[in-house]
Structures are given as structure tokens and as C-alpha cells.
Image (spheres, rainbow, N blue to C red):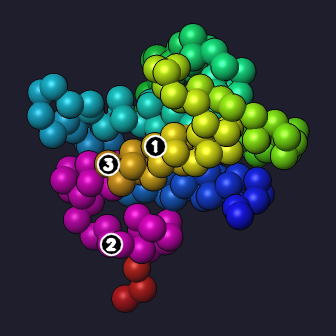
Amino acid sequence: MITKDQLRDSLTRECDIASHLFTKLSPESYSYRPAPEQRSTVELLRYLAICATGAIRCMSEANWKLFSEYSERVKEMPAEGFPQMMALQKGEIEAFFDRASEEMLAKEAPMPGGAVTAPLAVAILNGPLKWLAAYKMQLFLYAKASGATDLKTSNLWRGVDAKP
């Protein structure tokens, strides 16, 4: 059985790794977009900076309309604002788990779309944790495609540079 501390630590670790990957981006890469209809790097950074904490709040309060507050936070965020917003998200995740009881995490919570529910801890695992991991990987791929060719697996999964 996964504990709430383990879930929190997994979420915040993904935040740390995404912040590490950000340091590998050049300012020229902020406008990188793999295809015209896909997000640019800065748009990806904006979403990554709120996707976990916004969803956790929406799930825990059973109100997906609250997500717009988080979208508004980063609407005009320049890429350089990512580290600060990611630190804020990490702090909000830690604060949520500090006040979350086991009973709260066992209560049914709505997944996006509202038709499916799951215990809140499971919803957080299957939503925000997976989203952080997936969008972190997308950031890694954007960074590599836009010139950070020295990135390695260790950057993506451990948030550290490869040893020579």
C-alpha cells in the first residue's frame, strides 16, 4: 500500500526533475513548437507549472471549475517564471498532503470530466502524478529537439546530469 508521504514525494520529485530540465533550455527554445498545432515550449511550461496542484484541488473539492484559477495564474507567465511557479506548485502539493487525512484520501473524488470517480489518492496517482511524468517527458523531448542534445536518461528520470 502506498502511503500519502510516498505519493507526495513522487509528485514533488517530478516537480524537481521538471525544474532541472528547465535549466537545460536555451531562451531560443522557448518558442519551439514541434508542429503548428502543438504547444510551444513556453505553453508547455505554463501547463506543467499548474497541472498537478490545480487538479488536486479540483479533485479534493469536487469542482473542476476551479482549474481556471490555475490557468489564469500562468496565462502570461514568461518561460523565466517557470522555476518560481514550479516551486509554488511543489509547496502547494506539500501543504495539501500535510493537511490531508487518510480518510480524506479514501473519499471518492471526480476525475476530469466528472463521470468517473476514484478514491482521492488513486485519482491523484492516476491523474496529477501521471500528468507530471508525461509532461516532464514532453519537456525533455522538446529540449532535445530544440538543441539540448547533451540530455541523457539521467536528466529525465533522476534530474541529474550524466557522469562523464
- 2 and 1 marks in contact (CB < 8 Å): no
Q: Which mark is residue 152?
A: 2
Q: Between 105 and 82, which is closer to the camera in this rendering?
A: 105
Which residues fall within the magenta stretch?
Answer: 139-161
Question: The disc labelled 2 sits on which kind of residue?
Answer: Lys
Q: Secondary structure at mark 2?
A: loop
Residue that numbered label 3 is attached to: 138
- Residue positioned 26% across, 42% down in the render: 28
Q: Is residue 114 magenta?
A: no
Find residue 80 and report its horizontal and vertical position in percent: 47, 36
Circle nearer the N terminus (2, 1): 1
Q: Secondary structure at mark 3?
A: helix
Find residue 138 and report its horizontal and vertical position in percent: 32, 48
Circle nearer the N terminus (2, 3): 3
Q: Is residue 146 magenta?
A: yes
- 3 and 1 marks in contact (CB < 8 Å): no
Residue that numbered label 1 is attached to: 131
Q: Dot 1 surroundings within 10 Å: few (below 14), some, or many (20 or more)?
A: some
Q: Tell me how many marks there are.
A: 3
